Image (cartoon, grey):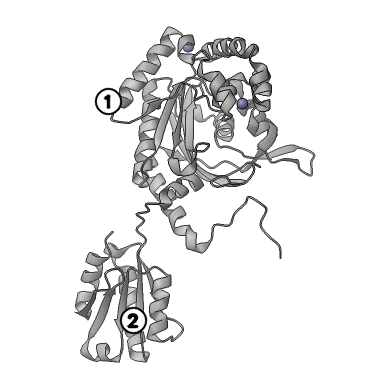
Amino acid sequence: MIKAIKGMEDILPQDIAIWRWLEDTARRDLESYGYAEIRTPILEETSVFVRSIGETTDIVTKEMYTFKDRGDRSLTLRPEGTAPIVRAYIENSLGKISPELKVYYIGPMFRSERPQKGRSRQFHQIGVEVFGSASVYADAEVIMQMNNMLKLFGLKGYTIKLNTLGCKKDKDNFALALTNYLKDKASLLCNDCKTRLEKNVLRVLDCKNENCIKIVANAPSILENLCPPCREGFDKLKGTLKEMGIGFEETKNLVRGLDYYTGTVFEVTHPDLGGQDAIGAGGRYDNLVKEMGGASVPAVGYALGMERVIIALKKDMSLCANVIYVATLGDGPKIQGVQIAEKIRRDRDLAGTIVITDVKESSLKSQMRAADRLNAKLVVIIGDDELKKGEVILRDMRSKEQLNLSIEEVIPKLREKARC
Ligand SMILES: [Zn+2]
Ligand SMILES: [Zn+2]
């Protein structure tokens, strides 16, 4: 048997409803904030990612799907969405079309990590990028929208963690202070952190190794290394979020693993994913457009992992995909059943409802089993008796309540009952 590549999963028909619903909900919410969708290719030249994410980051050193194509070019399956969008932003002069640009994307990303819960090698993200504002009000709106969208998804119990890395100069100063602090403690650090100390010292701060956590507990803080404008900006952001009623936890060791972040960084965590995994993360990257060859354009964005959102949602899912099953017995009832099914499908108030009729001439019992399997909320039952009386039976599959209705009463009753 030929199998799917390890860590790359099929999304099967029985699971597609939640994916579609998440995507639809996200699109509606994002577009109400003025975001427009952007779709970039899944393959890019490898340099797009190496130059932006950073040569020493985990993604670039260990996790990218990179290969040579037939023309001997080094290509990479996109491991994240920001770098390709910045590439597209510069290449298509999107900054000229609109000095402030808000885009979103929904699609697959690829990283060859060890597959585990919420971590596939092909995974999916919903993300945004806002170009053209250096103000903390842009950060605040990005976080507010993300928070609002998570609420629309029905997600509960998540935490927004917030920190700042300061400007490039602050970040460099802090990296130096941290290196000095860790220098004589290097032998106590885990092997990964020994490398990070040389190449990417900020990453030592979010190491999950117990010894490393103990060592960094007393490390200098980024807040001590902020220049006055960066400090004021961060205070203003926190004040704004509080005013808007958005809960967050200031987390001084939150650094994010990608080189391009400066200024605000944030992460959303959820207890169902364990300590390691964030549902999503984002931050400001004011130097990236310039570093990739464009103008000096400040930007901020985030990405949410859809698989992870789904794991967190599965516990208290309040999804509303309505299935109505029309069960019929006999030729006359079958025709009437098909007519009623058509009426339901065309009814504007019942838009989005899935209506299933029996096309196998099965027994009533096996039709009821099928309705159960399909998670039908309501079943319309028509037999010869009902046909003669001009009636149908409407069965509510949850309460098990049954009603006898005249044909005219069916649609109004379904409108009332099919509501979430
Ligand atoms: Zn600064
Ligand atoms: Zn470590």
* Residue drawn at x 39%, y 40% as measured from the top left: 30
Residue annotated with mark 1 = 243
Identified by mark 1, the residue type is Glu
Nearer to me, 204 or 90: 204
For residue 256, side relative to residue 62 (left or right): left
Identified by mark 2, the residue type is Gly
In the rendered image, the vertical position of residue 266 relative to residue 125, given as above or below: above
Instruction: Report which quarter residue 420 is drawn in.
Output: bottom left
For residue 328, side relative to residue 105 (left or right): left
In the rendered image, the vertical position of residue 319 relative to residue 226, given as above or below: below
In the rendered image, the vertical position of residue 60 relative to residue 77, given as above or below: above
Is disc 2 placed on a helix, strand or loop?
Answer: helix
In the rendered image, the vertical position of residue 118 relative to residue 260, given as above or below: below
* Residue drawn at x 63%, y 50% as measured from the top left: 7
Residue projecting furthest to the top = 228
Residue 407 at x, y = what percent? 22, 80
Within-10-Å neighbours for mark 1: few <14, some 14–19, many 20+: few
Nearer to me, 186 or 284: 186
* Residue drawn at x 33%, y 81% as measured from the top left: 337
Residue 43 at x, y = what percent? 65, 42
Which numbered circle lies on residue 337? 2
